[in-house]
């Protein structure tokens, strides 16, 4: 109890000190700023009322002029013209009636004209009439988005494929882009001071899709803001007087009118909406929006923020993965941010490496398919070999415990490998390079797909070392043996055709012991090739 009493006395002293010192004055200034903001919101409500009254006056005046021009009378006629006012060209009507507008509606008329002057974005996106919330991300585009920069135009006209990073780097020095960025920063600073934004992030980026479609450099602007109070001020909340702690409520809502949202006559598109999130999810959604504008994405030109990532908030690796999946950032940028996230670094970086490996494999497969299509017209019909049609292939039409393998021996450039591949088709043939090795690599062999295995340039020693494999028994065969047995794998080759192609089979055969030579002669069908195995006519 004594310790609790001492803590209470210390807390009271801290509160009294903070109240008397400059920190208390600071929060007093925040309180006055809050009162000024409330006064500004009240003035905004008055202006909204004036605009509504002006619209009513304009509608009634326009309806009266229409009725007078047509010599119409009656309440029903007046109501019909009032209803059609919504579909009329109200900006033009307001400009025509400016000399007749009462003085009390002069400011409201200027605000309405400025709000109605809205440019169309470069892409068809919905724009809000107003915004009320704790934070969001806006995207701006309009006529200013089309950049007249001759070096960039020359780069786009050079060919269909364009280096986006090179194009973005060139636009950083374009005078038009620099002027837009300076205007946007000034406008954003004024807006943030007026509505007391806690955190602000802005970015100017290349609109890649529109740029490549129209072949003209096109940009858009991003603005991310929120009113979340800073962590330092929330940490001081227990030591502050009651009036000051009320200023630290998280998620203070702001109301932005259509005129306040417009930049250079362009209204924004809301590209981030966290209205469905609750509690901590709101903060994480806002943090993710700020991180999105701080990352050096493809097409990024300028970036600026008041809340640097990794310093003012933590970053989830899933955010980085999402940007990488959407092709917003490259692999090097993703790896850099995974390291900065400091969470499951090895798993995420290995995923990057594995993706690169699989991407290369898919590319090779595509190149192989393309090469096969190009070479298909050059292929010639294979010749008919009696040993193949009468001795080798009939083995696979009836059940057998063991089958003989085929050996095609002869000089190079006779088409032995192509002939072996043609017996069962390239799609159903597994080909492995056995030149200079004593063990075939059959890890990619697929029993559900392959009906034939071609051992290209296999030696007699390889076959003798794997007798069970070349006998093709009705049992699994283990390969990849080593001292530890770490890389052993099993395959099934029963009723699968095994073909060996070689240039020196007979030479190697003569150098073997009599027992080995006898085994090979008894288990192989040897064809000595001296002529091309394809028709030359």
Image (cartoon, helix red, strand yellow):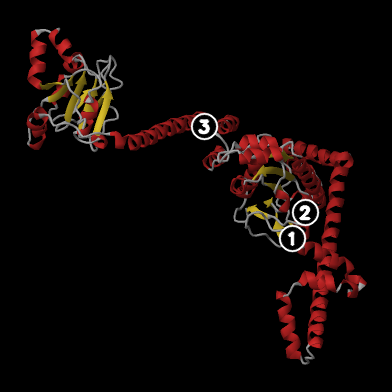
Residue 427 horizontal/vertical position (percent): 26, 37
* Marking on residue 118: 1
Going from N to C along the chain, the mark reached first, 3 or 2, is 2
In this image, 519 relative to 235: left or right?
left
Q: Position of residue 415 (x, y in %)?
A: 23, 25
* Neighbourhood count class around disc 1 (C-alpha, 10 Å): few under 14, some 14–19, many 20 upward: some
Q: Secondary structure at mark 3?
A: loop
Query: Which residue bears the numbered disc 2?
Result: 264
Question: How many labels sit on residues?
Answer: 3
Q: Quadrant of the N terminus?
A: top right
Where on the picture, by quarter, is residue 85? bottom right
Residue farthest to the bottom, as pictured: 74
Q: Is residue 29 above or below residue 54?
A: above
How many angstroms separate mark 3 from mark 2 (CA)? 45 Å
Q: Nearer the viewer, residue 360 or 488?
A: 360
Tell me the tag on residue 344. 3
Extreme-front residue of the structure: 537
Answer left or right for 439 relative to 75: left
Distance from disc 1 to disc 2, alpha carbons, whole Å, reads 9 Å
Q: Tell me which corner region of the image, top left, top right, bottom left or bottom right, holds residue 205.
A: top right
Q: Is residue 491 visible?
A: no
Left-right relation of 281 to 533 = right
Quadrant location of the C terminus? top left
> In the picture shown, does residue 126 fall above or below 294?
below
Instruction: Between label 3 and label 2, give the one nearer the viewer.
Output: 2
Residue, x 62% and y 41% (percent of image)? 157
Residue positioned 59% across, 45% down in the render: 212
């Amino acid at each position: 109890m004594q310790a609790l009493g001492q803590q209470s006395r210390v807390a009271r002293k801290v509160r009294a000190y903070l109240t008397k010192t400059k920190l208390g004055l600071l929060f007093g200034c925040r309180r006055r700023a809050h009162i000024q903001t409330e006064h500004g919101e009240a003035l905004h409500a008055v202006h909204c009322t004036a605009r509504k009254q002006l619209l009513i006056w304009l509608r009634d005046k326009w309806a009266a002029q229409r009725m007078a021009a047509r010599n119409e009378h009656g309440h029903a006629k007046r109501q019909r013209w009032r209803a059609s006012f919504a579909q009329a060209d109200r900006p033009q009507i307001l400009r025509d009636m400016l000399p007749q507008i009462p003085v009390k509606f002069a400011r409201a008329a200027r605000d309405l004209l400025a709000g109605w002057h809205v440019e169309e974005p470069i892409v068809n996106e919905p724009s809000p009439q107003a915004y009320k919330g704790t934070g969001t991300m806006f995207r701006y585009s309009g006529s200013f988005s089309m950049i007249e920069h001759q070096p960039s135009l020359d780069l786009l006209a050079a060919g269909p494929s364009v280096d986006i990073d090179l194009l973005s780097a060139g636009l950083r020095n374009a005078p038009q882009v620099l002027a837009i960025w300076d205007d946007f920063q000034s406008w954003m600073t004024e807006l943030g001071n007026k509505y007391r934004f806690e955190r602000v992030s802005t970015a100017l980026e290349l609109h890649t899709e529109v740029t490549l479609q129209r072949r003209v450099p096109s940009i858009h602007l991003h603005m991310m803001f929120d009113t979340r109070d800073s962590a330092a001020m929330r940490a001081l909340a227990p030591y502050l007087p009651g009036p000051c702690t009320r200023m630290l409520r998280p998620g203070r809502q702001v109301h932005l009118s259509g005129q306040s949202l417009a930049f250079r006559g362009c209204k924004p598109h809301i590209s981030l909406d966290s209205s469905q999130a609750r509690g901590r999810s709101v903060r994480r959604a806002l943090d993710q929006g700020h991180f999105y504008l701080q990352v050096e994405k493809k097409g990024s030109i300028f970036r600026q923020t008041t809340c640097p990532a990794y310093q003012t908030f933590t970053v989830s690796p899933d955010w980085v993965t999402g940007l990488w999946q959407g092709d917003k950032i490259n692999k090097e940028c993703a790896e850099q941010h995974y390291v900065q996230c400091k969470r499951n670094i090895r798993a995420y970086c290995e995923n990057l490496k594995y993706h690169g490996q699989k991407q290369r494999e898919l590319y090779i497969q595509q190149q192989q398919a393309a090469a096969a299509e190009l070479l298909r017209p050059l292929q010639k019909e294979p010749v008919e070999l009696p040993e193949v049609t009468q001795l080798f292939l009939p083995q696979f039409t009836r059940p057998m415990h063991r089958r003989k393998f085929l050996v095609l021996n002869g000089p190079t450039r006779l088409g032995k490998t192509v002939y072996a591949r043609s017996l069962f088709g390239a799609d159903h043939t597994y080909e492995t390079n056995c030149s200079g090795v004593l063990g075939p690599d059959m890890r990619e062999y697929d029993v559900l797909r392959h009906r034939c295995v071609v051992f290209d340039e296999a030696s007699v020693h390889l076959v003798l070392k794997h007798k069970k494999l070349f006998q093709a028994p009705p049992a699994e065969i283990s390969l990849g043996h080593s001292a530890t047995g770490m890389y052993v794998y099993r395959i099934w080759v029963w009723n699968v055709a095994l073909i060996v192609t070689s240039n020196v089979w007979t030479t190697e055969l003569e150098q073997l012991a009599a027992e080995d030579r006898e085994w090979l002669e008894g288990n192989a069908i040897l064809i000595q090739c001296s002529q091309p195995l394809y028709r030359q006519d």
